[in-house]
Image (cartoon, rainbow, N blue to C red):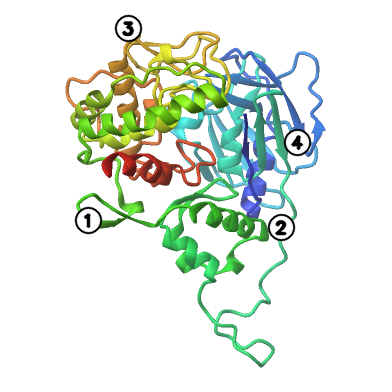
């Protein structure tokens, strides 16, 4: 499977940040070793890496690239301050700006400063660090998220592709403002287009081409002129995908609510009996698909309903919806992807498309109940109960910033890599839990959970 992150160059600041971040290649004290070299291409041309120099690689399930890979045609100035471990970047044609004071950092922490502004990378993407070859590297996802270039990762060919930004669009300085006469004649009416208004009605989490997030409801305050033609094309594709789902749903008690308002935290609606009945009704269809279409033996579906409801309640998480998510992630526990049944991994934790090395950190998770084994895809949990609780914990991390409930032991090895509280709703998982995941939350709610509670 090929996971593609495609981004559009949005502004000069992004250009400057990208150019400077790739300029780095100092000889610094070694802080980490690397392995699993992958190839890199820039604008479809293979990147020439000198023998013995730093190539792109995979570490802890993340793909890293050397920061100097596109330095030749970019013109920012870069300074390394070893005393504060800061990368100071000054845009071409600008005067240097003093870097902000820095205290309380560790010897492994590298801070990137662009024209006096600190640039942070999301914790769940990894952080810049220095390899055993003395080269500074950065997670390639962070390049997309924070820098605005086009990047993609092909797991089959183990190739990182980086696309330089297109030229910025012509200045809109001469364009008429909404409500202003055009050439002394007709008035350019204010307001948004039907495309943006329709997207806004879904109130759903969207990932833009520059890899930033926005709620589609915010498009009500935008105009098509605010976006590139490429972004508008993506919006049209999003609208087609979203059109398969209802913006509002009817609950079993007759209440109509916006799908966007369904939170991850809360009380379960379905009972264990309802969840079991739903699975029993789906089993014949799944068996037929496995045996006739996929030529695979049907795997008996484990009875996890009670575990999801009980553990979900202990964390204040809607266990019935988590159960529905597990059904989606595992194809009704047939594990047709890379994760295997013996792993008790019901939500794809640490299944990134690349096999584990076995050297990844558990990040504080209990080693007696969690294993990261070389050659496997995703974490292995000691029991079904541990796998369910790790799933619930990961949802807890996305939905709030609270510490684990008293007495709970950390089981999700990626809990501390999540930007805590970034997705309090199921639709907030779109583009975060799954990429691109445009309708990921809607599918959990309407393709799975509603069928369980309405049966």
SS assignment at label 3: loop
User: Going from the N terminus, do you reach mark 4 or mark 1 first?
Assistant: 4
Report which quarter residue 440 is drawn in. top left
User: Going from the N terminus, do you reach mark 3 or mark 2 first?
Assistant: 2
Q: Is residue 85 left or right of residue 165?
A: left
| 3D distance between C-alphas at marks 4 and 3 | 46 Å
Residue nearest the viewer, comparing 449 with 148: 449
Nearest-to-viewer mark from 3 and 1: 1
User: Going from the N terminus, do you reach mark 4 or mark 3 first?
Assistant: 4
Q: Residue at x 41, y 46 (%)?
A: 442
- Residue 71 is tagged as 4
SS assignment at label 1: loop
Pointer 3: what residue?
368
Residue 198, image x, y percentages: 48, 65
SS assignment at label 2: loop
- Residue 76 is tagged as none
Task: Tell me the quadrant of the picture where the C terminus can be found.
Answer: top left
Nearest-to-viewer mark from 2 and 4: 2
Residue 266, above or below 297:
below
| 3D distance between C-alphas at marks 3 and 2 | 53 Å
Pointer 1: what residue?
254
């Amino acid at each position: 499977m090929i996971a593609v992150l495609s981004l559009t160059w949005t502004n000069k600041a992004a250009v400057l940040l990208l150019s400077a971040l790739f300029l780095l290649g100092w000889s610094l004290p070694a802080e980490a070793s690397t392995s699993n070299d992958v190839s890199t291409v820039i604008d479809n041309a293979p990147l020439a890496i000198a023998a013995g120099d730093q190539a792109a690689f995979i570490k802890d399930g993340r793909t890293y690239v050397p920061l100097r890979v596109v330095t030749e045609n970019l013109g920012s100035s870069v300074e390394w301050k070893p005393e504060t471990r800061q990368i100071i970047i000054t845009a071409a044609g600008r005067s240097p700006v003093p870097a902000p004071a820095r205290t309380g950092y560790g010897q492994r922490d590298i801070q990137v400063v662009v024209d006096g502004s600190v640039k942070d990378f999301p914790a769940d993407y990894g952080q810049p660090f220095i390899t055993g070859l003395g080269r500074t590297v950065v997670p390639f996802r962070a390049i997309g998220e924070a820098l605005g270039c086009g990047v993609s990762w092909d797991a089959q060919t183990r190739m990182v592709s980086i696309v330089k930004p297109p030229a910025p669009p012509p200045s809109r300085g001469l364009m008429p403002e909404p409500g202003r006469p055009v050439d002394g004649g007709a008035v350019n009416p204010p307001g948004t287009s039907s495309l943006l208004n329709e997207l806004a009605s879904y109130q759903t989490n969207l990932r833009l081409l520059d890899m930033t997030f926005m709620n589609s409801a915010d498009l009500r305050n935008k105009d098509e002129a605010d976006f590139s033609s490429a972004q508008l094309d993506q919006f049209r594709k999003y609208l087609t995908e979203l059109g398969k789902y209802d913006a509002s749903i009817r609950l079993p008690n007759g209440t109509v609510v916006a799908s966007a308002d369904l939170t991850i935290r809360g009380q379960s609606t379905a009972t264990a009996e309802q969840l079991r009945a739903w699975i029993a009704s789906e089993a014949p269809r799944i068996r037929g698909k496995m045996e006739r279409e996929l030529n695979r033996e049907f795997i008996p579906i484990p009875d996890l309903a009670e575990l999801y409801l009980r553990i979900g309640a202990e964390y204040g998480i809607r266990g019935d919806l988590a159960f529905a998510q597990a059904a989606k992630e595992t194809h009704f526990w047939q594990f047709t992807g890379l994760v295997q049944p013996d792993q008790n991994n019901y939500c794809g934790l640490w299944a990134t498309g690349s096999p584990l090395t076995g050297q990844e950190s558990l990040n504080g998770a209990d080693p007696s109940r969690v294993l990261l084994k070389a050659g496997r895809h995703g974490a292995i949990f000691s029991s079904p109960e541990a796998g369910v609780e790790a799933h619930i914990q990961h949802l807890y991390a996305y939905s709030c910033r609270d510490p684990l409930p008293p007495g709970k032991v950390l089981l999700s090895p990626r809990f501390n890599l999540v930007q805590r509280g970034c997705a309090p709703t199921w639709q907030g998982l779109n583009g975060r839990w799954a990429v691109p995941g445009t309708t990921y939350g809607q599918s959990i709610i309407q393709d799975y959970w509603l069928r369980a509670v309405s049966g």
